[in-house]
Image: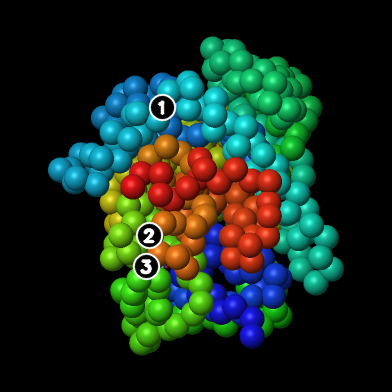
Amino acid sequence: MSTQVVIVGGGIIGLCSAYYCAKAGLKVTVLDRNSEERDGCSFGNAGMIVPSHFVPLAAPGMVALGLKWMWNPESPFYIRPRLDADLIAWAYRFWKASTPRRVEKAAPLLRDLSLASRAAFETLANLPQIDFGLVRQGLLMLCKSQHTLDEEAVAAEKARRLGIPATVLDAKQTSALDPNVQMLIAGAVHFPLDCHLNPNRFMACLKQELDRLGCRFLWKTEVTGWKTSDRKIHAAVTSLGEITADEFVLCGGSWSPSTAADLGLNLPIQAGKGYSLTLTAPRQLPRICAIFTEARVAVTPMGSSLRFGGTMELSGLTEEIDPRRVQGIIKSIPRYYPEFEPDDFTGIQPWRGLRPCSPDGLPYIGRTRSQANLTIASAHAMMGLTLGPVTGQMIAACLTGEKTGWEFELLSPDRHS
Ligand SMILES: Cc1cc2nc3c(=O)[nH]c(=O)nc-3n(C[C@H](O)[C@H](O)[C@H](O)COP(=O)(O)OP(=O)(O)OC[C@H]3O[C@@H](n4cnc5c(N)ncnc54)[C@H](O)[C@@H]3O)c2cc1C
């Protein structure tokens, strides 16, 4: 009899884990507290696959930048001040992790993970039965000021030293690369290995493949507790009753800590809320996805539509939309793309998603000491789409006992216990 696996969470990490587990011959059930028409973090994101993002969120300078930005309601980063013990402990760990030594250790791992994931996206894109429109034209870090371009040139040099190609371009060279859109910039760095896709379409393709592989889905099924004994889970207690399995995988995104609360596991995660706005008939349609470097806004062409996404707001698990932060995104756009106007966004409903962020900027992937048959895949922060496939492969390897070359220590879910 094949091993029965219950995967908690039907976001990208849950579906990728389900896909590679099902491919490995395991019998998979995916549970989600929401309906099949969910619209969480894995759907409205910027759709970028970014080997260029090898620096974790917890990096030198981030604490100072965060403190500077947090007083401006339209800035890219905001912490809602509150007396919350979990937030204070998380912020302390973030500060402790933001050292050059830790970044140096994390960067090669993030690079290897995202390159392996990019290769997995290529394999998936070659499957004849699915089409999620993978675009392999790289990413442009657009810089308004020469000062930022100089800083990004230093980052590009670091990338090249890590084996990630990067080219520094002036404004004219950038326009030649993407003539479809007018830009008001000093220049850009082009990372040719980065890609983009439409995440809603990618999620639909994964679901279709999982149906074909015989995966079972239980929607509107929330895990509210666990039945355990002798450090082993026997059943997930859900709104539908108890669900038994041999193995359990927690892919609950920002809700992972509360879902794991009774399991003796300390999984610090803060929700980093972001917003996106999608124009279905944009004035201009760039060819290449881009990041407005100073404004921290991501721009992604998705077919004939154009999505703008940004902000990181640590305000707990609320999914409420703060219009001031959405305005911050909208106001930044004409500063880089002068043909666009704030009025273009009138009547466009902003989307929101909660990025699950660990304090050291690395995800939790792997088995935990707390329960013998529990595996965690969570806290992918700004890299969940990028790292989805490789995470799924790693989870399947954990469950089947397959040997991989991955170093799980830095990713251990027990590292803060
Ligand atoms: C604006 C924005 C732009 C982004 N752009 C990019 C990008 O370009 N590239 C990139 O790589 N990443 C990007 N990201 C990050 C990426 O979207 C996330 O890292 C990723 O979606 C997280 O996926 P997940 O499956 O861990 O979490 P989620 O998508 O949140 O899924 C978790 C699921 O678990 C379910 N769940 C939780 N608890 C329970 C429970 N107790 N019982 C049952 N179900 C439960 C939830 O309902 C949810 O469906 C972006 C994020 C935002 C907000």
Q: Mark 2–mark 1 contact, CB under 8 Å?
A: no
Q: Mark 1–mark 3 contact, CB under 8 Å?
A: no
Q: Which residue is mark 1?
A: 98
Q: Position of residue 27 (x, y in %)?
A: 61, 79
In this rendering, would 6 be left or right of 322?
A: right
Residue 221 can be seen, yes or no: no
Q: Residue at x 64, y 36 (%)?
A: 111
Distance Cα–Cα, label 3 vs label 2: 6 Å
Residue 151: quadrant of the picture:
top right
Work out whether residue 365 or residue 16 is closer to the camera in this orientation and state it: 365
Colour scheme employed for the rendering of this structure? rainbow
Mark 2 vs mark 1: give the one in front.
2
Q: Which residue is mark 2?
A: 370
Mark 1 vs mark 3: give the one in front.
3
Residue at disc 3, CB closer than 8 Å to ligand 1: no
Q: Position of residue 377 (x, y in %)?
A: 50, 57
Q: Which residue is mark 3?
A: 231
Q: Earlier in the sequence, mark 2 or mark 1?
A: 1
Q: Residue at x 68, y 26 (%)?
A: 162
Q: Position of residue 308 (x, y in %)?
A: 54, 45
Q: Earlier in the sequence, mark 3 or mark 2?
A: 3
Q: Mark 3–mark 2 contact, CB under 8 Å?
A: yes
In this rendering, would 362 be left or right of 91?
A: right
Q: Residue at x 35, y 34 (%)?
A: 94
Distance Cα–Cα, label 2 vs label 1: 27 Å
Residue that extends furthest to the front in the rendered view of this protein? 230
The image's mark for residue 306 is: none
Work out whether residue 214 or residue 331 is closer to the camera in this orientation and state it: 214
